[in-house]
Structure formats: structure tokens, C-alpha cells
Image: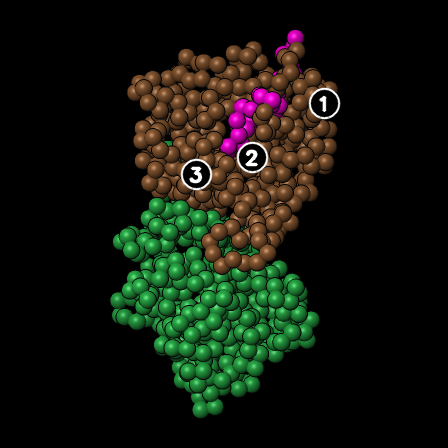
Chain colours: A green, B brown
Amino acid sequence: MHFDQPLSLESGGVLAGYDIVYETYGTLNAERSNAILVCHALSGSHHAAGYHHADDRKPGWWENMIGPGKVLDSDRFFIVSSNNLGGCYGTTGPATINPDSGRPFGPDFPLLTVRDWVHSQARLADRLGIGTWLAVVGGSLGGMQGLQWAIEYPERVRHVAAIAAAPKLTAQNIAFNEVARQAIRSDPDFHDGRYHDHGTEPRGGLRLARMLGHITYLSDDIMAEKFGRDLREDRISFDFGVEFQVESYLRHQGDSFVGSFDANTYLLMTKVLDYFDPAAATGGDLSAAFRPAMADFMLMSFTSDWRFAPERSREIVKALHDNDLDVSYAEIESSQGHDAFLLQIPQYVDVFSAYVERMEREI
Amino acid sequence: MHFDQPLSLESGGVLAGYDIVYETYGTLNAERSNAILVCHALSGSHHAAGYHHADDRKPGWWENMIGPGKVLDSDRFFIVSSNNLGGCYGTTGPATINPDSGRPFGPDFPLLTVRDWVHSQARLADRLGIGTWLAVVGGSLGGMQGLQWAIEYPERVRHVAAIAAAPKLTAQNIAFNEVARQAIRSDPDFHDGRYHDHGTEPRGGLRLARMLGHITYLSDDIMAEKFGRDLREDRISFDFGVEFQVESYLRHQGDSFVGSFDANTYLLMTKVLDYFDPAAATGGDLSAAFRPAMADFMLMSFTSDWRFAPERSREIVKALHDNDLDVSYAEIESSQGHDAFLLQIPQYVDVFSAYVERMEREI
């Protein structure tokens, strides 16, 4: 969907016009009361469920949750999933051709915030004829968008489900993002972000960033369980090839990301994460930040998630309670780390389902 | 000290001859019973205490512990600290000129193990006239050398103090090492390790490796305490310069490491860590691995150390107890993460001192 009206950004910049790519699953009911916005995380896209082609190797990223008969049931709800501004899956972003120059925006694409995204999503809602979302739902950075929706547009969202989210990044979170950014930016093929003009790509840097990301998505325990100290061959080879299985896993994750994701988008997404801090507008007081909110909330976290640990969700829960909001919170037992929010964990599915049933009764 | 006699390595290779650089503090007593070997960690050196020049910016890496009147009191003990084989501070390593080619060994330098190091340290002890160490002492990878000493040369070590160590690396530990290695090896200036021949150095890769390392040396809490989300300027600048203080810290750590450390040595040291697993020789049974040991042990760990967590030290303690060995164990309350072993934390100093007093009474 193309948007002509300029979008003012939190950075002070303006996006003159832009496209947003989105998918929908299910049908908007006559009352327009069954619409759910699904927000994606760092490297996600609008393609949240189903297959596009018979030969697709993988379905959308939240296939476990979205579809007929699933938690986010496309037989009952109208589910909208858009690729966020700055993305690289069709929505206007750094890899898009800048109409002013005829070349990709690259580093000229403005840095964004979760608030900017929510504003752009609100316009998408307008165009789709959705006055109020039944729910805004997402995991990780996706959950942060849900929280921001409740603050920005209190009357336009009835429920927020924020899973494995955090009220803001810690210094350690920012540190990991910074190493990922430095990996990309110090790659000689980065060319200050104008790699498209040079016919190159900072492949090595993006690969490292992704490898590092994957360490933080998994828990220590699940890594031990999946790989332990298992060797690829029977014995140590005393060289720098793949010796341990975990090395093979990381290299594979890095290699398969390169070529499918734009490095400037990766940089931008990590900055959006770093900048997220709704309490900054209220002098660091998270409870005050949520004062405008009117939605009901469901927060979920996973015991082994050390990227956005349960403690971080509990901070949000407390701030919501301080505003006498209706909050459900579940800490899901899982060894899967941050990645758990993408998986089909029975307790997680049960709790999520129960909440969605309740939402539906209120339609 | 030069060694002519070839050293057979665990990899099957042989080191024809080599130099070991070492420092000593204090005087060996007439009975030769007061010698303590201090072993360094990943990026350490033989320079463990004191200053070499009046204009040195920093003292040796364990200045907090070694010196007159300190825990490892150079007025009472003869303390030996060597740079391990493969190092880059004077001991023979990848940056040393290979006499066969007249050029630096680079990638031709053999990969080593903690066992190889212990063998080379035993030869150093022979040459220094030290039949039995009063103690072998170290933190992190240094502690692992102490443990290996107790297994390899049970009659040559009376005490082992292993601080912030682990019986072997976890998959997550190996994963971090692997990302660091890939950062170095994918740097175009790496030239398959022959960067000396090209007059280059994989500076970008080594810088990333060090930045990443520093994240794992600090705890989440101490990072929050030191940097939080503090901005370098008053406000977010919406660019890729330093925005948060933690970014500044990491970049500084990375930059100051480059130029002072050899990248091939870094690769080698991470492999030594990955390979360490004394229980591999006994079918995974750590208790069986320690069966030869006769030393008394002191283990210490730090509550916020997530690189080598207290649980890992407790695994060692259990295995030592299974062999009816004399073991002291202290878990030190600290928010400083793995780095704590380098710091002057009162409880740590007290416990360490008390153990050293006891050692001395037994001389």
C-alpha cells in the first residue's frame, strides 16, 4: 500500500511518501471488531503465516500461532501483519530506490523509532478501515510495538499481547547490538552504507551479526542440550574448520541470513531497539509512561530468556498495575531462551489461547 | 629462557625448540619450598605485577594480588609468571620468526592445549630448580592450568588455587569463541593468518573479538551500574556515532587491544579454551579425571560471573570431593562478572589470604 502523506519522524526527519507491504489472514467482520495487528521482531517480515509457493522451504515466521484453528484463528479474526518501515521485504527502507537520486537510500534512510512505526501502522489501519484493533500482538521488538500502541492510541487498541518484551534495553543488550553494528560497519564492503552503489554487500559483517544474535536467542541450557560439546568428527582436528557442532550451527545461521537480509536494515532495526524507552518521555517513570493506556494487557515471558528476561516483563506488569489496568501475566517454563516465543510450547499456547478466547467473548 | 629439547604436543605435532618469557617476584628459599606458579588467562602475559618503566600506564595484570605484603607476598614467596606458548609477549608463538622459513610462523604454528602448556611449564620449573610448586594459581584459563597441573604432575604441586574456572567450556562459551574467531578469520586483512607477510593485520576482526569478549567479562548488572542507558551527549543523535556510554566503552576496549595483541595468538588461545576438558580422557567422568591428583585445592567463583558461573566451580569441587581431596571453596558475592578475579574485592582478598596463610604454615 502506498502512502503519499509525509510522515514526520521522531528524529525530526520526514519520510515524504512510502510503501508498506502487508499480509492479512481471515476476514474483517461487519462490525470491524475482529482485527488483530501482528508486529514482527528484528529480522521478521510481513510474511507471518502460510506459504507463498508450493516450493517454499519454510512458512511464515509465526505459522505456529496464526491460521485456521490456531491461537490467532484466521477463521475468527482478521489478522494484519505488515513489514515495518525501514524493512527489506518490500516496505520502504534503506534498500529502496530513493526517487530523488535514483539509487538506493542506503545510509540516507532516516533512523526510526517504535513510535514512528506505530504511527505508520495507524495509517495502515485507517486505510484498511480499522478504527480499533481488537489486539496488537507481538514478541520481542514486536511486543514493544504493542506497548507503544497502548500509549500512542489508547482508544484504538482493546488488548495488547506483549511476549518476551522489555520496557527498554539494558546496557548489555545495547552492547550486543553495538558489536553487531560494528561488525557490519567495519566490513570493507560496507562503504559507509553505500554498498549497493559499489555492487557489494557487507556479507562478512552481516554474517557475524547474525551469529552473535543467535547466541542471545538461545539459552545456555538449550545450547548445551542441542549441541553440548559434541564434535562434528570423532576427534578434535586441531584446526580452524568446524570442530564442535555448535560452530556448524552458528556458521549455518550466519550464512543463510546473508543474501536474504539488507545490512542497512539490520543496523536500523538494532537502533530502533536501542532507542525504545517509553519512560524517557516521563522522566524515567514507566508507570507514568503508561498513564494514557486503556487497553487490557497480556504479558508473557520465558524462564530461560536472558535477552529479555522475565524480570523485564515484570517491570512492565508493575507499571501497568500502577495504572489499575487489567493485566494477565504468565511466566512460561522453557529452556528455549528468547526464541521460545516463536515455538509451539504447550503451556505458552494454552495461556495465549485462553487469553484470546476471552478477547473474543468481548467482541 | 630457551629450550632446545623438542616438545611433543597433544595434537601430534612437535615444537622443535622454543623460548619462554617469564618474570619472577621474590626469592626462592633454600629449601626451594616457597615457589608459586601464576598462570595467565586468555589475553594475559608474564607481566603479572609491578611496572617495567616509570612511564608505564598500567602495572602487571595481577598487581592487586602480587607484591610485597599482598596476598601472593613477594617477601615470602618466589612467584613465577610465564607467558604461555603460543603467546605474543616474547614466548614462542605464531608471531615468532620460524627459523625454517625466516618468516613468522603465522598459521603454521601448532594449536596447543592446556596440557601442552603444563608440560612446558614443568620444564621451566626444572630449569629454575623447582621440584615442587607450593602452589599453582590462576583465574579463568589460568585456573584451568592449575587443575591440569594437579592431574599431570601430582607430586609436583602441593596446592592449586583455581579462581573463576570451569571443568570445560559450555556450548555457549564455545559459541562466543567461534564468533570471535570468525570475526578475525573473515577480516580481509587476515590472509589466512599470513597477514605479517602482507604487512597487514586483521585489526577490525581483532577489535570485534575483543569487544565481544568484554561483554562476557562483565555482568549484566555491572554494565547497568557502570553505563546504564546513559547517553554520551544529552540526547539521541539518530546516527551511528557513539550514542550510549556502553558503546564508547566497548569501542575503546576494542581499539586499545588492536596493536598490542597478535590475532593468531588470540585464535590459538580461544582454541586452547575450547579444547580444555580433562574428563575427556576418562570417558567424561570428571571425578575419574582427578583420580591422580594429590594437591589441596582452593576454588573460588563470583556470583555474577556468567562466563564461568559458580555452578561450574561446584562441578570441580564435587569431583575433587569424590576423590577425598582437601578442598576449600568460596563463592564470592560480586556484581563484577568474570572480571572480578582481577579485582580487589575484600571478601575475595580475605578468603584468598587465609588460604595462602595456611599454605605458608605448611612450608
Residue B140: numbered disc:
2
Report the magenta residues as a range: B30-54
Name the amino acid, label 1. Answer: Gly
Task: Determine if residue A323 is in view.
Answer: yes
Residue B206: numbered disc:
3
Could you say whether the residue bearing mark 1 is in a helix, strand or loop? loop
The residue carrying mark 1 is: B69
Name the amino acid, label 2. Answer: Ser
Left or right, residue B362 beside residue A142: right
Left or right, residue A361 beside residue B3: right
Image point (55%, 52%), residue name: B244
Q: Position of residue B152 (x, y in %)?
A: 51, 24
Mark 2 or 1, nearer chain start: 1
- Badge 1 sits on which subunit? B
Image point (36%, 59%), residue name: A106
Q: Does residue B214 show up magenta in the picture?
A: no
Front-most of residues B252 and B263: B252
- Badge 2 sits on which subunit? B
Image point (39%, 60%), residue name: A108
Left or right, residue A227 beside residue B192: right
Task: Determine if residue A211 is in view.
Answer: no
- Labels 2 and 1 in the same subunit: yes
Name the amino acid, label 3. Answer: Leu
Mark 3 or 1, nearer chain start: 1
Could you say whether the residue bearing mark 3 is in a helix, strand or loop? helix
